[in-house]
Image (tube, rainbow, N blue to C red):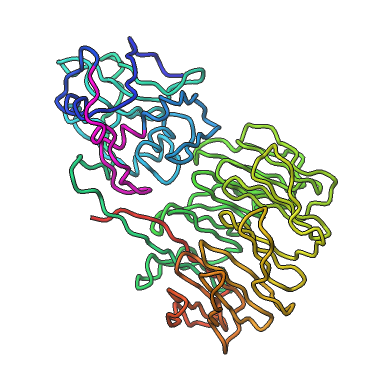
Amino acid sequence: MHPSPSRSHRRRSVLTAFTLAVALGGLAVAGPVMAADPAIAAPAANSVVDGQISRSEVLVRSQSWIDQRVPYSQSVSWTNQYGTYRQDCSGYVSMAWHLGFSRSTATLPAVMHSIAKADLRPGDALWRQGHIALFVRWNDAARTSPVVREEYDYGHNAVERAWSASYTNTFSPVRYNKIVEDGPTPPNSMKVTRYGFSNTAGVILAKDERDGSWQTLNGGGASHWVFDGDRIGAIIGGDFLLKDGLFGGWRVMAGGGDVKKIALSGGRVAFSNGAGIIHAKDQLDGQWHVLNPDGRAGQWILDHDRIGAILDGNFLMKEGLDDPWLAMAGGGDVKMIGLHNGRIAFSNGAGIIYAKDDRDGGWHTMNPGGHAAQWTLEGNRIGALVNGDFLFKDNIHAPWLTMAGGGDVRQIQLNGNRIAFSNSAGIIYAKDDTNGAWHTLNSGNRATEWQLEGTNIGALVNGNFLVKNGLDAPWITMTGSGDVQHIQNHDRMIQIG
């Protein structure tokens, strides 16, 4: 628990240009302030994840949790128009600064630096190990009592209030490394594609951008690995390791040599062991939540704040680490489950797919005849491999369209508007228009693995990692060692300039 400051102040639901100017000048407003021109009262959201962000946008983002009365929690995350973040002090600041995940007070120093107390400006923060709050303005002309926004303890909602001078002196003033002053020119952003592969020795190599230099991430022994944002997770020697960025050090998430599956989704980290027990947490330095102490999870997935699992053949779902499991489908015959941006789906032993977009709504039977060997969700679209044919529908209620017949389809993928499949010969076909013609991507070579990511197509052909940026672009050899076992492309937005 954190001591309460001396007095609280009324929150302001709209940040005006005038109040920002007063805050920059360092004096509190004595009374109500009339709203300024709406065109400048709420600045545009120009930031991207982990990129530059203006001070006014930080304050607009932070005000959203105050308006929505978000309660404090170290185990639950809140989702609004600004993303999904843990509901504690560091999760709140992570949201306001538009970080890629909910950092803790122990890991926030990696993205901030110390400043002089006299240099505090709106959007900066007051930090100490265990707590952090956003600085808004000074409450007195002597600049001893700050007005802050914070999530500070159980039983309280996100709030704007004043701190006493004595309490303030126990904190260090800090600044987000990528905060920028407000101005007419919005920050620039760009998409960066991370490429990665591993070889037969379990060595993972990765780089950002096609022409970058490969970085060797480990000495070998990786049986599984994933990208999510700037994070990299891996099972190495049966342990779950995690690193932030290509050059960060590995952190042991779970040791003991019994990790069988890992998953990263936004700020959430999860794994399961040989007994099928799922562990998850939203704070890297926090305690693991044991989601199913009895184990026996046959499959499980993360999607934003939701967790889906097959337990004893039944489909269960929870919407937060501390929430109870909800029974989605019983009967003991569930074989595959899917969660995607609110959509919930599963299939049974007969290959019948069921889906719905409302947790409490009724299931829609997608293919009463069954025989779906594979299926995938992407946006509002559903793709299925049924009796060796590739079927596709634009939404739950739309009719199935045959994308590829002949009974020889082996793998299907949907990514954005792109549709692709491969056959038993390992030939990949793709198109960007459901009514367009198929492009044959590798007529002479057998692809044993391939992936769509944005405009990129990655393929593992004859043990080599190949990439093309567009259906008609040539293949580019990322590595021609002949020893590649697994590949991955991952897009993310970063700030430049």
Query: Image check: 333 left or right of 285?
Result: right
Task: Please tell me which residue is depicted at 33% across the width and 59% down the height of the picture.
Answer: 190
Question: Is 108 contained in the magenta span?
Answer: no
Residue placed most toward the observer, 429 or 198: 429
User: Front-most of 416 and 201?
Assistant: 416
Answer above or below: position of 100 versus 260: above
Name which quarter of the figure residue 445 lies in. Answer: bottom right
Residue 71 in view in this figure: yes
Which residue corresponds to the image point at 34% horizontal and 19% vertical from the top-left? Answer: 11
Q: Residue 68: x, y in percent?
A: 45, 26
- Residue 273 visible somewhere in the drawing: no
Q: Which residues are magenta?
A: 33-61
Residue that lies at the very extreme toward the right in this rendered image: 331
- State the quadrant of the C terminus: bottom left
Residue 426 rendering spot, x and y as whole percentages: 63, 81
Lateral position of residue 305 relative to residue 424, left or right: left
